Amino acid sequence: MRQAKQGSAEKLLKAAIDLISERGYHAVTTQEIASAADLSEKTLFRHFGSKQRLLETALERFRYAEELQILFNEQLVWELEADLLAICRKYHDIMNHDRKLILIALKDEVHIPGFKERRLQNPHQLLTLLTDYFITMSEKGKIVCSNPAMQAFTFMMAQYGAFMNDLEAGENYPGIGLEQFIQENVKVFARSLTIQKEL
Amino acid sequence: MRQAKQGSAEKLLKAAIDLISERGYHAVTTQEIASAADLSEKTLFRHFGSKQRLLETALERFRYAEELQILFNEQLVWELEADLLAICRKYHDIMNHDRKLILIALKDEVHIPGFKERRLQNPHQLLTLLTDYFITMSEKGKIVCSNPAMQAFTFMMAQYGAFMNDLEAGENYPGIGLEQFIQENVKVFARSLTIQKEL
DNA sequence: AATATATGTCAGTGATCACTGACATTATAG
DNA sequence: CTATAATGTCAGTGATCACTGACATATATT
């Protein structure tokens, strides 16, 4: 029955993430989590010892930032619009993967040590990589970029806003989809960075 | 003792907002709220009847969108960069005023009817007003704007992202302040909208 | 002084919840 | 067949929490 144990723990973790991300830690009972996993409450406590420990274990599933590194190391073509598009898509990809965990962190009724730091690792890394990208592009003479760090941040914030908007309510703004937004935003940035300022 | 009653209800509402926005509805007890307001738990229940009703009353404090309307009606000078700056500042002003309520809504462990709608009223209105502004500016020949609604949305998302970033953790990104971000973002947009696309 | 109003104290109720111990069941592995 | 591991059932325990009723107190108005 070894695979049975594995399966049970997984089911419990998934149920916990699903329920807690929707309704919050304190609003979900251990009984509910166990039922959602088709297991008894007893099994939950045998596996994790406490409700808090269950959540902590669940949060360790948070995705790390390697994918982003790979993208920047290998998949860029040094053509502004194409690269920004690729970066955007990877960003939303990663964020969507962690969707429910981000929701839990947002509600954050429970303090889990080190979790906030891990959550922030991705955006921080993206900021660094994007800043370096802008600098290099600037050196290559392909863009005009007076303040790379700030412009990288600005670009990131737009993505973050769109993600949060989508996360919170799905369709707050009828007729405006994420993909459309990404394309428009990339265009705005590309246009702004590829021309001389002449006011 | 009429002003005393007024004062007590206010104190309770403020305490409720403060505590619940920080730790969530279920994590805060009525006892704590009462103590924070320097009143007895009994007084809380005499005023509001239930914990839920207390929160509902507190959330009715949500600011309405008149200020935004006034800004667009009276305070624009039809000069892109100046207007975008003014709009940004007013936006963050309003959002910051509702900061704690937005946090509560984000955690949203309690379903309060009609609250989500009220919360979304502001951004929706801003989107409409900003779109109209872009259209008019385009007609005046002051900007080149192919897709006003989408570009207004894009501009808004950047502001929203920056606000949420600030809301969540204050100083996630050392050395980058909100005001700097606003200025840079306005520049990026202004540059993108004031030139011909020539790719 | 008399009345009304806002608040406090205190002791308690009933519900819920995280968590436990004792014991039974099922399945698998050796 | 037997030992072991995973799960279930059931009946709890102790703590916490929203909420209440009875009664007292303080203050202000008339």
Image (cartoon, coloured by chain):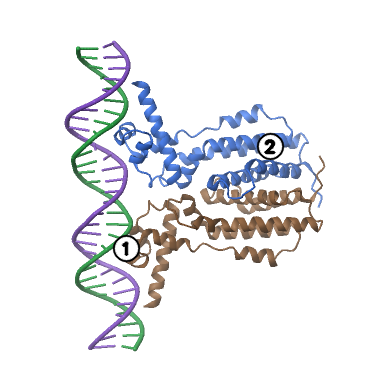
Chain colours: A blue, B brown, C purple, D green
- Where is residue D14 shown, x and y percent of the image? 21, 46
At a point 54% along the width and 48% down the height, the residue shown is A169
Q: Which residue is mark 1?
A: B41
At a point 74% along the width and 33% down the height, the residue shown is A79
Instruction: State left or right for residue C20 relative to residue B86.
Output: left
Q: Secondary structure at mark 2?
A: helix
Answer few, some or many: residues within 10 Å of disc 2's Cα (few below 14, many 20 plus, some between 14 and 19): many
Question: Alpha carbon of mark 2 to alpha carbon of mark 1: how far?
Answer: 55 Å
Compared to residue A140, the image places residue B30 above or below, namely: below
**Please, which chain is the residue tagged with disc 1 on?**
B
Instruction: State left or right for residue B190 relative to residue B179.
Output: right
Q: Quadrant of the N terminus of chain A?
A: top left
For residue A113, say whether it is visible. Answer: no
Give the number of the disc on residue A62.
none
Q: Which residue is mark 2?
A: A84
Tell me which amino acid carries mark 1: Glu
At a point 53% along the width and 35% down the height, the residue shown is A97
Q: Secondary structure at mark 1?
A: helix
Compared to residue B34, the image places residue A23 above or below, namely: above
At a point 52% along the width and 32% down the height, the residue shown is A64
**Please, which chain is the residue tagged with disc 2 on?**
A
Q: Nearer the viewer, residue B114 or A149?
A: B114
